[in-house]
Image: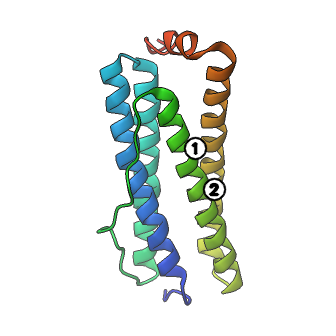
Amino acid sequence: MKAKEGVVDFLNKVVTLELTAVHQYLLHAALCKNWGYERLQHEFHELATEEVGHASKLIDHILYLEGTPDVQKLGAVKSGPNVSKLFEENLAFEQEDANLLREAITHAAKVGDYTTRHKLEEMIKETDEHIDWFETQLRAIKQVGAENYLSEQVKKES
């Protein structure tokens, strides 16, 4: 099926963000492991795995639309010296992702590509869940203090 005008361009922009997210979450998982926060290491690894799935589905969809997936680009991978900074960077990243997804959804609907729109709408649900999770973690740190919050992140739940 031939892609409608501009759809593959949007999908490739989303692929770039998803692949950047994989790298960022893998780095943050490794940092948390190094700092001794096993629960957070597990959470970040799960996020990275989810983003790999998103990128894979997008690549398959681009090929279905007879486009060429662009997997050569990667955005800036952001990090920080502590868990709070990681959460802040990831919250900003997920908000950027949500904005791009909304723009791509609007474009897909405008050009009548409802299959692409549906796929992107599924992705934005998960992106909104990620935003909520990062906001919740930052709120918890603010309410109980970093030391109390981090003491709960040392061991993964069985």
Query: Vertical placement of 60 versus 108: above or below?
Result: above
Query: Vertical placement of 152 versus 55: above or below?
Result: above
Tell us which disc is closer to us: 1 or 2. Answer: 1
What is the number of the mark on residue 124?
Answer: 2
What is the number of the mark on residue 91?
Answer: 1
Q: Which image quadrant for residue 118? A: bottom right
Residue 86: x and y in percent read: 47, 35
Residue shown at the point (40%, 68%) measured from the top left: 59
Q: How is the image coloured?
A: rainbow
Query: Vertical placement of 146 versus 10: above or below?
Result: above
Q: Nearer the viewer, residue 66 or 134?
A: 134
Q: Secondary structure at mark 2?
A: helix
Q: Report crowding for label 1: few under 14, some 14 to 19, many 20 or more residues within 10 A (C-alpha).
A: some
Residue type highlighted by circle 2: Ile
Q: Are marks 1 and 2 in contact (CB under 8 Å)?
A: no
Residue 146: x and y in percent read: 55, 17
Residue type highlighted by circle 1: Leu
